[in-house]
Image (cartoon, rainbow, N blue to C red):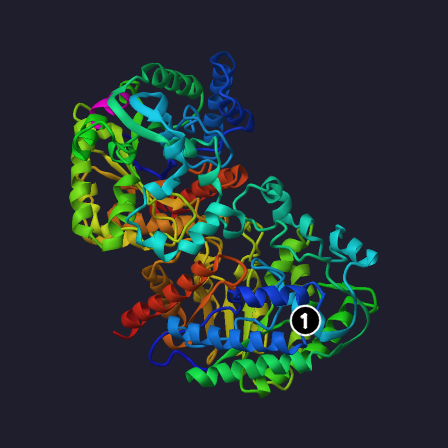
Amino acid sequence: MKHSVDRILTTHAGSLSRPANLIALSKAIAIGEAKGDDAGYAKVLAASVADVVKKQRELGVDIPDDGEFGKPVGGSYDYGAWWNYAFARMSGFSAAGSPAAAAHETQHKKSSVADVALTSFANRRDWQKFAEFYLDPESSGSLMGSAARRPVGRPACTGPIKYTGHAALKADIDNLKKAMAAVGADEGFMCSIGPGSFARGIDLYYKTEEEFLFASADAMHEEYKAIVDAGIVLQIDDPSLPDNWDMINPEPPLREFKKFEQVRMEALNHALRGLPADRIRFHICWGSWHGPHTTDIPLKDIVDLVLSVNAGAYSVEAGNVRHEHEWRVWQDVKLPDGKLLIPGVVSHATNIVEHPQVVADRIVRYAKVVGRENVIAGTDCGLGGRIHPQIAWAKLQALAEGAKLATKELWG
Amino acid sequence: MKRSTERILTTHVGSLPRPDDLVALYRDDAPDRTLLPRLRSAIADVVREQARCGIDVVNDGEFGKAMRRAVDFGAWWSYVYDRLAGFTLSQEEAKKGRGAWTFGSKERKEFAAFYAAEASAGQGSGAQATTTQTGTSTARLYGLTCTGPVKYTGHAAIARDIENLKAALGGVPVEEAFMTAVSPATLQILPNAHYKSREDYTWALAEAIRDEYKAIVDAGFVLQIDDPALVDIYDWWFSADDDLAGYRKWAQFQVEAVNHALADIPEDRVRFHICWGSWHGPHKGDVPLKDMADLLLKVKAQAYVIEAGNVRHEHEWKVWQTTRLPAGKLLIPGVVSHATNVLEHPELVADRLIRFARTVGRENVIAGTDCGLGGRVHPQIAWAKLQALSEGAKLATKELWG
């Protein structure tokens, strides 16, 4: 993976704004009404990826991706594509919407010290503290309304999990490589879900949570390996590591939570077995909905788990008012030699476009703590599907301009 | 005016969330006999709530300024319609919406698709559809035109607001109280069909609104002048041509006008608020603070209340490294903001305050908000932000006083 050897490099967290014609076609796939294996869709997808790679380079993004365009969205505002895409690439899942699955989706699983359990969305702790806000249709953009939610429920695991997404993955890899070659980009990345996040789905088949988790890890290993083998940097998306904290109600003792998460990180490392750490970046965020996020777990409490992942780079949300101060964590916790930090320095959390000087100030703070060559400027989370496309692009531009200002300050 | 002599004091910009039933009374144009008792009790509640959240310098939440929907950006100045003679309301004019005012905006061109989506839907873009909602205070503003000599006629209304706030303060442990009033620069945005020139119009507005300023100060409250226009107008009228010189000329005159209105008022009873408009847009066209800070400091106020808690203006604390804050003056930077639903972490609030304190002196900084929170974020979030503000101020105090 490239380091910021002579200037601050730029990248982002993955999802970018899809063009309208791609959204129209992928909607049918997202809700299970089409398979996405027809030539018409393939053509639009390839062209869209070519465009979005070119666009990223024009805006000043050094390390682009395919915008996650191969992961179908259900509409222009869709927070779930980074997760939902994986169900279509696995066998062992029955169609969404079965009564058993639906019941699981909304049920409040009460947690206890002996049995730490994830609850449903509406029973999350932040949700309950700010219920009036979350339920108010007029409240500004919590995006929990119909446009943002997946139109149908998630599939349930009802048989052995096996990776079956080879064709879709190959198409994604081919599209990205072609698009990169066309603009002369020598490094690109592709996102893939971490087992901890994937295995938050409903399991009606495996005996234990751990079995489900490791079966997911074995299946995902194939996707990870294919991406790395193709010469593309693999980004593991695993918001579940910090995000599960808020999904456990009541709040568990930290020690129990860390045990709960440790298994998940072990499953991830199992899925990453045999792959070189310096081709892997690990992305965490605290969930991208526009809520108060008061129950987000502090980074300092989980940073050891983050660093336990066999990756060469850590992409961490840091560009919003709940987590901006956490650059200080790296004053106390040493970033291991040779590793990279990719802090979010622009965010989906506000429509305001970051001033390049704000971006530069954020980058410089990190560079002074962990070394300028170990910092790549990133975004909090994917921008696509979370804010208006015009604002998403303007934010990437602000990111690149801010990186230039920071470079000037850091290299003189 | 109180300053942060032994700890960082806290305040906010003015607007706070109205209770639903008060909004309903305004919306339905309820008669005084039903509106007034509820207004009085709501103000008593909101003062107590501010104290409970740890706010030192409180106000009436601007409850005397009619808000007709839960989300309504315009109450802070639409109230003058009921208090100034010389304006008429036209439905034709109202239909043009804000577009009639932002003719010179580069940002509105660059982000046309975003702003169009805001007007049509709102939710998905994270921006409210307020501007097109009929019946809001904001919509009412768009319909106002000056058609005759302006004259302040709101003496009874301001006396009522003053009395309500005084009553509410009884027995509540706070340091000080303030009340907001709109600036001439803001009022002169409303189209003028009466005065010969924009300058004459502005001057007349300054002479009219000073009655309100005077009433507030005479009552013993700190007067806060709300003047977002002083910075906003760059984006709306001058940015398309990058006409900074033209803007500065305009702004200089506006400062003269507001100082004219403040002529008989002691400087140490006045705080002056600027922000770059509170709508949830990109704000890429905002004029940098450094390009107008010298003009701002000419306003005859002791304290300057400035948006500084969002990603477009957070870095501007550095302006005070090169522009000296005159001795005796105070800064009230925004350290929590309506610009995001995410709740500021108290440690971030403290970091922001400490930066200002180290630059201009801890005793010269009061912790504030970017803009009013009422009508701009959900009430639950608004109150949580005020709490984060006071928690952050405590952390900053600990670090600054040890």
Residue drawn at 21 percent across, 31 percent down:
B202
Location of mark 1 (residue): A86
Give the quadrant of the N terminus of chain B: top left
Image quarter of residue B82: top left
Residue B288 in view in this figure: no
Determine whether the residue tagged by mark 1 lies in a helix, strand or loop: helix
Residue B84 place in picture, x, y as percent: 30, 22
Residue A275 place in picture, x, y as percent: 60, 85
Q: Chain of mark 1?
A: A
Q: Residues within 10 Å of mark 1 (few under 14, many from 20)?
A: some
Residue drawn at 48 percent across, 68 percent down:
A333
Q: Amino acid at mark 1?
A: Ala
Residue A52 place in picture, x, y as percent: 48, 73
Question: Which range is magenta?
Answer: B206-213
Please, is residue A244 above or below residue B65 in the view?
below
Q: Residue furthest front?
A: B92
User: Which is nearer the eye, A22 or A191?
Assistant: A22
